[in-house]
Amino acid sequence: MENQTEMITKQQKPSLFGMFTSPGEQFERIKLSPKIWVPLFIVSILYAIGMTFMALSMDASTLIEQGVPEDQVDLVLGITKVTVAITGILTPIIGVLISSAIHLIITKIASSPVTFKQLFSMNTHIMVIGAIGVILNTAIRYAIGGNPEIYVTSLAGVLNQEKTGILSSFEIFSIWTMIVTAIGLHKTAQLSKGLAWTIAIVFFLIGIGFALIGSLLQGAQVL
């Protein structure tokens, strides 16, 4: 019976949007039949759409506040919009590659039988959560205005802050990603729940650390 269930699961491909409804089941499918290229292409397109909304939401006043001279703002704005849109395509590829490599090192230390392909597929599927978050938040910002770098689903957005900082890291889709990552490391990488949650939380805290450093550097530039 167990072998029959495994064969049925293996025949079913993991679903990107199944990550929202049944992530545990998708991770079991990824463990048996990891898929990379089509999910990565879809996630890249979704990120590109979200970052395009962000680029369209940018205006000259935001750059002027950041110290860009008024006589150069139009040129810088045009370059920034193109750069942001292109970044949307590269972000998931680079992000998945780095996170999978780090996860592989950790899992091998923990004697997990997981492969790089399984981890790459797992992280690609997880990234669809962030992609939908980017589209939702940037589309809302495009419609209502405000700083496109401040997600409305973050604490900074709830408190109506206009500058990025540590509160921007406490965001629904980021926390959701952390939770699903812990499930994935347990199901796909076959790590213990305690270790899987520890890794996911540490990654989340590192993200907050980078946000804090960025906020401090931005404040230093203003001064």
Image (spheres, rainbow, N blue to C red):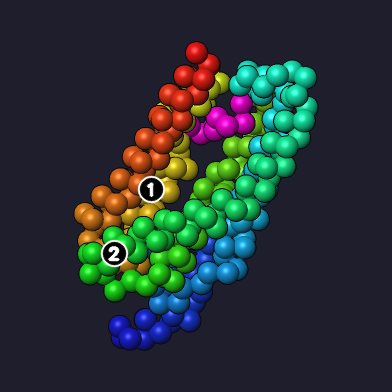
**Amino acid type of the residue that numbered disc 2 sits on in the rendered structure:** Thr
Q: Is residue 114 above or below residue 42?
A: below
Secondary structure beneath dot 2 equals helix
| Quarter occupied by the N terminus | bottom left
Residue that carries the numbered disc 2 in the rendered image:
107
Q: Is residue 55 magenta?
A: no
The magenta span reads: 147-156
Q: Residues within 10 Å of mark 2 (few under 14, many from 20)?
A: many
Q: Residue 180: where, in percent of width, then height?
A: 39, 53
Q: Is residue 156 above or below residue 209?
A: above
Q: Residue furthest top?
A: 223
Choose between 215 and 54: the one closer to the eye: 215
Q: Residue 202: where, in percent of width, then height?
A: 30, 45
Secondary structure beneath dot 1 equals helix
State the residue at coordinates (43%, 24%).
216
Alpha carbon distance from label 2 to label 1: 17 Å
**From this viewpoint, is residue 167 visible?**
no
Q: Residue 30: where, in percent of width, then height?
A: 43, 71
**Amino acid type of the residue that numbered disc 1 sits on in the rendered structure:** Met
Q: Is residue 152 magenta?
A: yes
Choose between 194 and 100: the one closer to the eye: 100
State the residue at coordinates (40%, 65%).
119
Q: Residue 13: where, in percent of width, then height?
A: 51, 74
Q: Residues within 10 Å of mark 1 (few under 14, many from 20)?
A: many
Choose between 34 and 23: the one closer to the eye: 34
Q: Which mark is residue 39?
A: none
Q: Is residue 142 left or right of residue 1?
A: right
Q: Main secondary structure of the magenta part?
A: loop
State the residue at coordinates (49%, 77%).
12
State the residue at coordinates (75%, 24%).
72
Q: Which mark is residue 178?
A: 1
Is label 2 in contact with label 1 (beta carbons under 8 Å)? no
